Each structure stands twice: as structure tokens, then as C-alpha cells.
Image: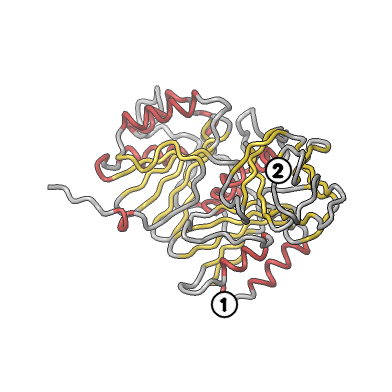
Amino acid sequence: MQQHATNDEKKIYQFPQQKVLCDEKPFSRNLLHSLLKMVYAVSPPYTGYLKIEGDAPFLLFLFFFNGAPYAAGRYTANKPISFSIQEFGDQLAKSSEGSMTITLCETDPVLLKCMLLFLQEEPTVKSPVSLIDFEHIVRQISEAGTNAMIALCRDNKFNFFFFRDGKGALAHYADLTFKRPEGMTFDEELLLYAFQPGEDVQAFIFRDMVTTMAADSNLLSKDSLDVLFSVGYPKNRRSRNVEMPAFPVGNQKNRRKSDRGLAPLPAIAGLDVLVSALLQKPVPSSYIISVESGPLKRERFTVTLPCTIGRKGCDLILNNSLISRRHAELKLVENTLVIEDLLSTNGTRVNGETITRKQLIPNDLISIGPIDLRIIPL
């Protein structure tokens, strides 16, 4: 009788997930075919990753951007490896169906970039946080005003913190046991996670933000992927001896230098576009407001911009004596989400700072009287 690993034995490596479309289902070629069909059919075009997990244990990743394959990777024995997509298919074709699970996750472009950085690039710093001046490194990123990514690993759970122009932009957690605190800035939350009691946290700090599309990504269609993942070579290829323009698995450093000049898919010129696709895309006119503290804690409200917030006669009413009748307004200014204080008695704060008007970025904490709010795009 075949023995299967328990969930605790299998879940050795964990990466952040966002919208999960298929969660650790037993692998089969039919299910893989169905998921690929979904990837190519959804609108707007799919961005995210397909994850194959084996009992060994190992993780295989296939990344998609705008509905097309972008890159592949493997993580095993605490080692990240960047794959060509043909190598991904070859590994998959040689693996036993009964020993694997399959997961499909839709992600934002920033999480996709963070995962690719982790699998493709050597970190500038790799060390337990207890052995480096981690606070100084975070200050350096802020003072330099450049993009950076910090991956923090605790109990084999990888959590990504992305900085844009030196400022904390987005955090993605695989460690769901960590309760994100209220009222902290991005940097404070990062340091709290890094120095929490218990098992030492490993830091991977990336200052080189260049990631690469797989050399063979623009040669593969849905039909050719189906065949590749079944037999290890693409449709209309009769032998594996006829090589695709890929690189050997063992020569990762040369690959990182060599394939950056290859022509990408017509829709994109490089992975930096993935980040700007999220951070510069048209701002939606509707948002979810999540209440983080006070009597309405854990409540969520859907609002349309512009949206006034106050005690009476407003779009969102928060009934508290410390909140003015018309306290603050959320609105779009030149396609940017802004909050403006409406001359309230007790003021409006963003991440603990009293403001009159401020542009908002993801994860900002808004305090109106004693009530804390976070804004989530639909």
C-alpha cells in the first residue's frame, strides 16, 4: 500500500499565496490540462503561478504574466534554481503523478517579481538577522531611495517585503501565524517580524532588482505546454535531442547574465513592467474599507470614490464623539488615491502622522478619531 506524507511532512517550504484558484489538489495530467485551460481563458489575462509540490520534498513553479508563460523555477534542499520552461516540463514528465500536488494562485505583479528575484538572483546579503545590523540595512534602503526586496524566512515560511523608491510598498506573508499589528509603519512591522521571539529569522536582501524571462517563454503556446508537460518536449518535437534555446540547469550564474538581452514576449519589455503594472495602473473607483479597531472592528464596507467619512451626513458614517460630522474624504487626484482631512476637530492620521492631505499606498493605516481603517482595492 502506497504511503503518503502527512500535511506537516509535506509543507516544508511555504511561499505567499493570494487568490488561490486550486489548493494542493492531488496531481493529475487531466487536472493540469484543466488549469492551463483556465489560465488561458480568464479575463483579465492571468498573472500568477502554478506550483507542483513533491514528496521529496521539492517545489516546481511556473510563472505567468498577462496570460502567457514567463519563467520557471525549483526550490529544494534550501536551494533556489531558475529553470527554463522546457526544464520544468522535463522534470514534470519524469515525476510520478501519485507523489505530487498542484496549486494555482493568482497574484499581483509585485509578488510575482519577489518570487522570481528569490529564485533567480543571488541576494546582496544572506544571514540570520541576529548576525547583521538589520535595522541599519533597512535605513540604508530608505536613505538610498531605491527599489529593494527583503525576504524573511521563519520556520521555512518565506515572507516578502518590497520597497519602491526606498519606501515600503507591499508585504506578502506566507507565515499566517503572524498577526499584523495595528498602527505600525511598514518599517516597524518589518522589524517586528524580523526580531520576534523564538526561532531565528533568516534574511535575504536583494538590491539588484533585475529578473529575467525564460529564453523559451515566447516559443510556447497552450497546446505546446500541454504536450511538454506530458512527455517532456513541446508539440511537434519528435525528440528531446533537438534543443530549445535554453540553458543547462547547473549554469545559473551564466544564465542570469546571458539571457537578459533576449527578445521577450511582444506584450512586455522586462519584469520591471510587472511592478509598474500594479503601482501605476489606473486606480479603481471602488474600494473596501476594513475597520481595524473600535466597535466595528473586522467590519468591511464597499465605498465608491469620492467618499466622505464622518459622524453624520457622510458616505461612510462612524458614530463616535471624537469624530467630526464631516471628518475626512477619500478621492482620486490625478489617478492617485488621496485622503484629505476636512478641518476635523481631532485630525486625521496616516501611519501615526497627522495629515491635512496625503497620497495613500497599499497597507497604509488611517486613523480617524479612535478608529483605524485600511483601504483595499476591489
Of all residues shown, which one is farthest toward the bottom?
131
Percent position of residue 116, x then y = 55, 48
Q: Is residue 243 left or right of residue 328?
A: left
Q: Is residue 86 visible?
A: yes
Relative depth, front residue between 362 and 281? 362
Q: 123 above or below 100?
A: below
Percent position of residue 264, x then y = 61, 34
Of the residues shown, which amino acid type is indicated by label 1?
Leu
Percent position of residue 59, x then y = 40, 49
* Residue shown at the point (48%, 41%) measured from the top left: 84
Q: 307 above or below 209?
A: above
The residue indicated by pointer 2 is: 317
Quarter holding the C terminus? Answer: top right
Mark 2 and mark 1 in contact (Cβ < 8 Å)?
Answer: no
Circle nearer the viewer, 1 or 2: 2
The residue indicated by pointer 1 is: 131
* Residue shown at the point (74%, 34%) measured from the top left: 305
Q: 139 above or below 94?
A: below
Q: Residues within 10 Å of mark 1 (few under 14, many from 20)?
A: few
Q: How many marks?
A: 2
Q: 342 above or below 127?
A: above
Q: Is residue 133 left or right of residue 228?
A: right
Label 1 vs 2, first from the N-terminus: 1
Relative depth, front residue between 116 and 129? 129
Label at residue 68: none
Relative depth, front residue between 204 and 223? 204
Percent position of residue 339, x then y = 79, 46
Q: CA distance from mark 1 to mark 2?
A: 49 Å
Tag 1 secondary structure: helix
Relative depth, front residue between 109 and 78? 109
Of the residues shown, which amino acid type is indicated by label 2?
Ile
Q: Is residue 63 visible?
A: no
